[in-house]
Amino acid sequence: MNNQLQGGSPVANYKHQFPYQPFHLVTPSPWPLLTSFALLILTSATVIYFNGYQSPFGGSGLSLLFLGLITTVGAMILWFRDVITEGTFLGDHTYVVQKGITMSVGLFILSEVFFFVSVFWAFFHSSLSPTVELGSQWPPLGIPTINPFELPLLNTVLLLSSGATVTYAHHSLIQGNRYGVILGTLMTLIFAVLFTICQGIEYYNAGFTIADGTYGSTFFFSTGFHGIHVLVGTAFIAVAFFRMLSYHLTDHHHLGFEASILYWHFVDVVWLFLFVSIYWWGS
């Protein structure tokens, strides 16, 4: 019996092909290390550029900033490619692994909830009881607020529409309707891009900046970080869209798409709070 359990026996090969535990033991990968260095370059270059310092390699920090951005995006693409290969083609993402990924996505979104709780806390701390330094009123005197029923209302319609189309795409995928899932996801991406463009137009035409006291800081910090989340969610859904075009997703194997939908609905809910509290009530 002991001889049959040696390395080259059929029993050993059977154990190698069908392990006793359902967890995925990740193979060594260079992408975490590359991502760490890329993020170091990106963060350092951002600080250098924003403060007007010279780059260590000469010139402004803009070229170093682009280098950090390109290396970060490249590392993410290579890392995600390996994850997709493991889950879709190698079958390493078992039911237990998928449950763990779902839980991690939920905990990540929960951490984002508390991040925005701190942002709203800062806003309401200043707006509910304006100090003398703020002129004892909110908004402070001299701040031309943005009309909530112009671009902000349009952005609200766009974002809520994107939530509806991505939900339609999800249900179409479950029902096996390939045309519906591609159409719904494409419409979601279009709405997301239009939202980002409108947000940029709003920032460009705003009558105040982030340097205009507490109001400017809380406004641009809250809406700006939400805009960053919109960009991340757009990339998240875009990856799922291209995987649909490549026939990677099925009606029972689309965990990445479900994660992007959960993230996008979180972005929708945060925007509703932003619109009501900062754009409408706060102005």
Image: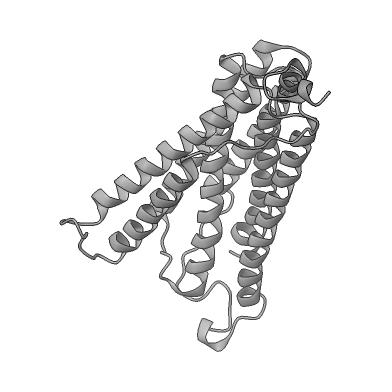
Residue 109 screen position, x and y as percent: 69, 50
- The answer to whether 283 is drawn above or below residue 26 in the figure is below
Q: Nearer the viewer, residue 73 or 198?
A: 73
In terms of depth relative to the viewer, which is nearer, 226 or 77? 77
The residue lying at 44 percent from left, 39 percent from top is 75
| The residue positioned farthest toward the left in the image shown | 58
* Vertical arrangement, residue 248 with respect to residue 235, above or below: above
- The quarter of the image holding the C terminus is bottom right
Judged left or right of residue 159, residue 176 is: right
| Residue 268 in view (yes/no) | yes
Q: Is residue 61 shown left or right of residue 71?
A: left
- Residue 127: x and y, percent? 62, 74
Q: Position of residue 241 (x, y in %)?
A: 57, 23
Q: Is residue 150 visible?
A: no
Please tell me which residue is depicted at 50% across the width and 36% down the height of the picture: 79
Judge whether 202 appears above or below 117 on screen. Answer: above
As rendered, which of 2 and 85 lies closer to the eye? 2
Q: Residue furthest bottom?
A: 132
Q: Position of residue 151 (x, y in %)?
A: 52, 46
